[in-house]
Image (cartoon, coloured by chain):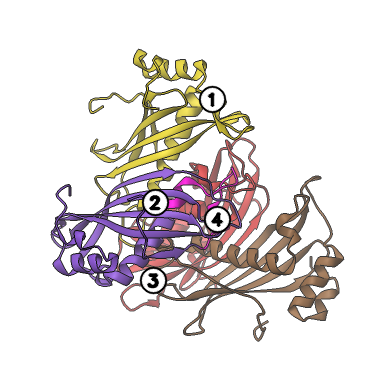
Chain colours: A red, B purple, C yellow, D brown
Amino acid sequence: MDNLKFNHITPIQLRFNDFDALGHVNNSVYFSFYDLGKTAYFNQVMPDVSVSKEVGVVIGHIEVSFLLSVYPGENVAVETAVVEIGNKSFKLLQHLIDLDTKQVKCICQTVMVCFDAITKTTRPISEAWRKAMADFEQNPELLKVHTNH
Amino acid sequence: MDNLKFNHITPIQLRFNDFDALGHVNNSVYFSFYDLGKTAYFNQVMPDVSVSKEVGVVIGHIEVSFLLSVYPGENVAVETAVVEIGNKSFKLLQHLIDLDTKQVKCICQTVMVCFDAITKTTRPISEAWRKAMADFEQNPELLKVHTNH
Amino acid sequence: MDNLKFNHITPIQLRFNDFDALGHVNNSVYFSFYDLGKTAYFNQVMPDVSVSKEVGVVIGHIEVSFLLSVYPGENVAVETAVVEIGNKSFKLLQHLIDLDTKQVKCICQTVMVCFDAITKTTRPISEAWRKAMADFEQNPELLKVHTNH
Amino acid sequence: MDNLKFNHITPIQLRFNDFDALGHVNNSVYFSFYDLGKTAYFNQVMPDVSVSKEVGVVIGHIEVSFLLSVYPGENVAVETAVVEIGNKSFKLLQHLIDLDTKQVKCICQTVMVCFDAITKTTRPISEAWRKAMADFEQNPELLKVHTNH
């Protein structure tokens, strides 16, 4: 995954109260940034995720490595890619980067689980979503069901 | 209002990310504290506000005076009182206080508007709510309709 | 003030967790938006506010009228203007607007107090700041000391 | 770790704006809860972490499993334990639990890295901290350096 090319990027507007008493962006705020990236990705690639009242995705698992702090005045953005698709879940890789220095500040891997809002149970990922993600990522490997999920 | 006796108090659990880069509680966070006070007040005095899907209250106007900063380790609480009741709205007075020093750190006045969630319009305050607030505040003046609202 | 022309505007990037259980932007989040507007204004008009360790401005008083809710997908921005300058404080007027409909969603008036970070006391507004604000607003009235502050 | 006994618990005061448009606590807010647990743990077990300007701990890595949503009115708390101590870092295990049902809502594992604020570099964990954590956890295994860190 190290030489992955991201096809999706969301610039982040930093807010004054993103910064904590240590003068850098508070750890808990990063998740709002990754949310912004995810939402923009879904809006672009599978726009029915956001509007559907019946089928949704929920976060199952998050893993975050904090590499470098974010300071006031820095220009940061979230890069988002789908890197694995299983039967009922898929994995997002996101990098929080400094747009000026190109440094990766923070890495996030998220397992999103496909969810039926009516029956309140998990459900298989539709072929339409699988194809939309594989096409967007230009990665035909994603069309196969990844067995870890 | 200066010698008002508050009958309702909500201690606040401060969070690390309530504090901004200046080392004190960020101005925008105070409104979460006043929300905690309001919610606890309504739960106690008019519990049907919180559960009703049909009738609610929305914030129309807020006025806040910041007197003293809040620093880590301080024990703060929100005192809440209803001080005026009009036809369709009522006014809350809230003090953010230091429980140890008794200092008033911040004063908030909020006009809450009674709202019909189905018709999406304002509506008169019910006599039951008016009586509940007047009783709780031990203030029979509140039973009269205050004409500014 | 009703026909004031704003010379400063800051588009707001809405975040998923700006929206509360009622489906609209939570009241407490508006203050983060006004902060974004203020910070951008100061960075442009009086850039030494942000960098100076010695002289700062703190919020003394806020007054907010909530007119219309903000919903997901709306394009909102904060317009900011200085409308009064006193001896030690000045008043900001800010409108949260919908960029598509031009509706004013929320109005905020903030009294900012000039502050000496070393002596921890209020201090007069410098002539340089007064001139910078009056020039930016193209409002020579601001050069006179407003006696309410 | 499944039958770990926690010796530290922090009840959480939920705020209205912790809940997002889906009606449950927003994923990004959980990290504020875990922060509350961590801060209380350090204040009790190694109080010099919080006050020291010279030696601190920073978050290196977080891994979170979201099992059950948190809804309004629920009584939740964060349980915190140190489960591994390496040379320059240690691992916290935290459970967000429902105090009424005893259900585990969310599990968080955090690697905290010991940091010298003056040289801006990582540094070994002091013997005093290692002993304080091992004593508090009543776990003599923690006195040995865990080689994964």
Instruction: Judge if badges 3 and 4 mark residues of a common chain.
Output: no
**Residue B101 numbered tag:** 4
Question: What is the residue that sits farthest to the front in this orientation?
Answer: B3
Instruction: Judge if badges 1 and 2 mark residues of a common chain.
Output: yes
Residue C37: percent from left, percent from top: 42, 35
Q: Secondary structure at mark 1?
A: loop
Toward the viewer: C32 or A114? C32
3D distance between C-alphas at marks 2 and 4: 27 Å
Q: Amino acid at mark 3?
A: Pro
Would you say residue B17 sits in the magenta stretch? yes
Q: Which residue is mark 3?
A: D72
Image quadrant holding the N terminus of chain C, namely: top left
Find residue A64 and report its image quarter.
Answer: bottom right
Q: Which residues are magenta?
A: B13-31
Say whether marks 3 and 1 touch (CB < 8 Å).
Answer: no
Instruction: Judge if badges 3 and 2 mark residues of a common chain.
Output: no
Residue at image coords 65%, 57%: A65
Image quadrant holding the C terminus of chain C, namely: top left
Would you say residue B44 sits in the magenta stretch? no
Dot 2, crowdedness within 10 Å: few (<14), some or many (≥20)?
many
Q: Amino acid at mark 2?
A: Ser
Say whether marks 3 and 2 touch (CB < 8 Å).
Answer: no
Q: Which residue is mark 2?
A: C28
Q: Secondary structure at mark 3?
A: loop
**Residue C47 numbered tag:** 1
Dot 3, crowdedness within 10 Å: few (<14), some or many (≥20)?
some
Residue A101: percent from left, percent from top: 64, 37
